[in-house]
Image (cartoon, grey):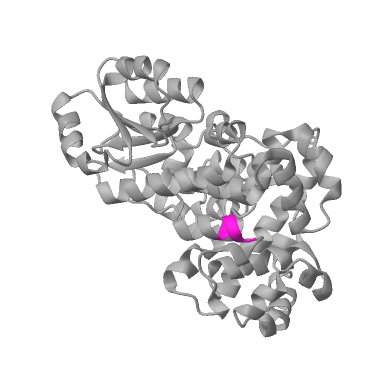
Amino acid sequence: MNTKPSIVFVDDQNNILQGFRRSLRNLENEWDIHYSIGGKETLRLMETTPIDIIVSDTNMPGMRGTELLKEVQSLYPRTTRLVLSGGGSRSDDISILLRTSHQFFSKPFDIDKLKSTVDRLLALREKVGDQKLVELVAGISKLPCAPHIYEAFKKERDGSSADLDVMGGYIAQDPGLTAKMLQSLNSTYFGVNKAGIHPFKAAQSMGPGTINYLFDEDNHFHTIEKSHPNHDFLAQVYKQSLHAALLLEALASAENLSESLKNISYTAGMLSNVGAIILACGQPEAYAKLTPEFKSPAQQMQLESKTFGASSANVGAYFLGLWGFPEAICTATGHCQSPETAPQQALDLTALLHVAQALARADDLETQKSFLSMPYLEKIGAADKLQKWHDLDKNEIRSLPALKDWTF
């Protein structure tokens, strides 16, 4: 049985495909690699050959890359869709690609970067396991937004003199807005991957005109209706996400993590619950039966794994990996509820996210402790810091207007 991942590279020029073949020769023992001229040939290939990952050019005659990826998204939702572009993509193409693809690579592509990306995505996908769940995650092009945040953002965005700082502030308060904003910056249209930076800085980088053009309401965003089976649960999750973002950023600074980790700490906190959001929205009726039984993070993970075959932590890590978020964010998300399984046992982003999520879920220290892996914190020499972290949260974070005035 062939267990190698199957990958197809798509371009309209044979000499470029031959160049790929030469560059990737050393990976033929690890990957089942296909090379395809244009979109129609690729779709014919996929009719008979299961493809794990497609890497497609965008500027092709006949069937454009945007059309091909849209077809693949519809027909083969579990396939990871990567864009390979020489730059100069049309802005309307980028708007479509943000709905049909997962990540962007620039020509000439970095083979080592591509390999590490593929290996990481396959490892994250393996932890999800269940194929229907893999299809659910890979098929997502947008996350729902908190209604009051999105309405305020839309009103500002559509105003005659949209204020970039105000828009950035709204984006930074919502997982759906944050995820889409940062995914968009990981594209050749903007030239550099900024997927992990603070969403407020991302908005500053993008500018009001581009935000207004690329993020039209119908295509990129939707909100959670009051009639949703998991409305009340999601309201709690969205507030906890904001709380975790604010607290994790403060903890990363207080514990003097590296500058690179400090820079992504807010985003890691904001997106740490995306797996629960995906399950609650993708399997609404089944998930609604579970939520009354969630008495602790550990119990939530157990019930999710038993029902769906994977925990929300693993689902979230796979989703963030697909969308090109930094490895440190994916690792922290995947292990934040079971930090003892993390590859590193240290006071790092994973450990502090574990703490931030526990503190955001309860008010009193004893309940917060019950949500924490105290043996793990003792092992890494951080258990005696808990009172200090609790006080920081109580005295500085919970009094912030964004949390005090939260509605859904």
Q: Quadrant of residue 173?
A: bottom right
* Viewer-side residue, 98 vs 375: 375
Q: Residue, x 47% and y 66% (percent of image)? A: 263
* Viewer-side residue, 98 vs 405: 98
Q: Residue, x 25% and y 36% (percent of image)? A: 88
23 lies left or right of 59: left
Of all residues shown, which one is farthest toward the bottom?
384
User: Residue 360 placed where, x, y %?
Assistant: 73, 64
Q: Is the magenta stretch mostly helix, strand or loop?
A: helix
User: Residue 351 placed where, x, y %?
Assistant: 60, 69
The answer to whether any part of residue 51 appears in the image is: yes
Q: Residue, x 69% and y 71% (percent of image)? A: 397
The span picked out in magenta is: 332-336
Which of the image's four quarters has the N terminus? top left
359 lies left or right of 91: right
User: Residue 358 placed where, x, y %?
Assistant: 72, 65
Q: Residue, x 61% and y 55% (percent of image)? A: 272
User: Residue 356 placed where, x, y %?
Assistant: 66, 67
Q: State whether residue 168 is above or below residue 349.
A: above
147 lies left or right of 96: right
31 lies left or right of 230: left
Magenta span contains residue 322: no
Of all residues shown, which one is farthest toward the right?
292
Q: State whether residue 43 is above or below residue 196.
A: above
